[in-house]
Image: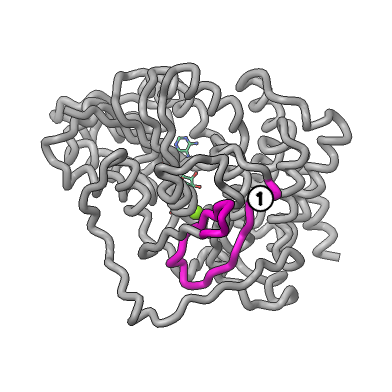
Amino acid sequence: MRRVSIFGSTGSIGVNTVDLLTRQGAAVQTVALTGGRNVALLAEQARRLRADLAVTAHDDCYAALKDALAGSGIAVAAGTAALVEAADRPADWVMSAIVGAAGLAPGFRALRQGRTLALANKESLVTAGPLLMAEARAHGATILPVDSEHSAVFQALTGEDMAAVERIIITASGGPFRDWSAERIAAATPDQAAAHPNWSMGRRISVDSASMFNKALELIETHEFFGIDPDRIEVLVHPQSIVHALVGFVDGALMAHLGAPDMRHAIGYALNWPDRAPVPVARLDLAQIGRLSFEPPDERRFPALRLAREVMKLGGLAGAAFNAAKEVALDHFLAGRLAFPGMAAVVEEVLARLSRESGLSNAAVGLDDVVEVDARARIAARDAAVRWQRKDQR
Ligand code: NAD
Ligand code: MG
């Protein structure tokens, strides 16, 4: 029987993963599920999958989770240390779907057990890509990407040699502001930014899609995961979100991956890999869709892509600073304390300041270095966000 654990089971990726696992029924044994404050959902999932252990990230949610699982025989734990300990429990397949830098440590611990890590948490590759890839190699573990674009590239590369790859193209829907003017974008509210046209996702990643910070993170992920030169990675705006990525080979051929915009594609692929098995997603009717369109991204209205290129050029700890600054800027935007374009302005300022002060290009020796830069970037970003807010109010 296959043993599985899900980190972040109550989120958008987590719920879809639980859905697919429920359909596999008796073939899986659920070792651990983890969530945050949505204790009722976590308990319901744990009962449904008959998990051995349920963990909430928050100490103050312990009692509620314990109550909700009373009499079930399911063990209960809370807090950051409990999350990491859950990753030490033997499992064959682990889903990393916590949002933010908090997802880093459990993923690393899972790799240390030489397991298959289905990686949805973007921040792992962006902040600590080289460390993560080295950890997987050192322990003979497998990382399977769970992002529609990276899963698409991974699938297009099956049986191919990276030496024959000329370029990788990841697509972007363009988000809700694709055809908005810069002036209109400047006044956008969090609810407008979170209204993604095609994908149903968590609130944070939805706003990141509107700002193209999501695509910026994905550019860096592509570079780290596939080991391809930044100059050979392209972003293509494709409003229908049907083509997820394309791989261009040295003979000029392009292999594209198409599918309905449903994350259960990428999750199901990672779950069944190296085989394929039926996944309950909508089948495409291309005749009905009629036409697919493509356009270049506009880096003037969406500076995040330009910043990602800068991060890849700097290398080292720049990804950690970039991600942390972006997370803080996003918090400020969601709280109504920063205008939409202020997010990119804050991130740009933090990158410039930290590279001036400490040279972000130094490679991380260990996770400690990543954690340290992450903390410094957060402080710098809070500073910058307050200054940008004052500027806006003048
Ligand atoms: P979400 O916000 O819906 O869910 C996040 C999960 O993480 C929840 O279970 C929550 O309880 C948990 N969590 C949040 N903060 C935590 C903390 N500090 N400590 C421990 N647990 C915490 O997010 P999501 O949309 O499911 O995305 C999860 C990850 O997958 C993100 O890194 C995201 O970028 C990536 N991703 C998501 C999608 C998508 O379609 N949703 C696609 C590709 C990649
Ligand atoms: Mg994606």
Q: Camera-side residue: 199 or 102? A: 199
Rendered position, 169 above or below 17: below
Measured as percent of width and height from the top left, residue 199 is found at: 43, 63
Measured as percent of width and height from the top left, residue 312 is found at: 71, 42
Give residue 101's quadrant in the image. top right
Left or right placement of residue 272 versus residue 38 in this view: left
Rendered position, 112 above or below 232: above
Measured as percent of width and height from the top left, residue 151 is found at: 43, 48
Give residue 183's quadrant in the image. bottom right
Q: Camera-side residue: 259 or 267? A: 259
Q: Is 250 a magenta residue?
A: yes
Q: Camera-side residue: 287 or 128? A: 287
Query: What is the span of residues highlighted in magenta in the rendered image?
Result: 230-253
Q: Residue at left 70%, top 49%? A: 231
Left or right placement of residue 278 versus residue 270 in this view: left
Rendered position, 384 above or below 336: above
Q: Is 232 a magenta residue?
A: yes
Give residue 32's quadrant in the image. top left
Left or right placement of residue 177 versus residue 239 in this view: right
Classify the position of the N terminus by image quarter: top left
Q: What color scheme is it?
A: one colour
Q: Is residue 146 visible?
A: no
Measured as percent of width and height from the top left, residue 202 is found at: 45, 54
Q: Residue at left 51%, top 21%? A: 135
Name the residue tied to disc 1: 232
User: Which amino acid type is shown beneath numbered disc 1?
Assistant: Arg
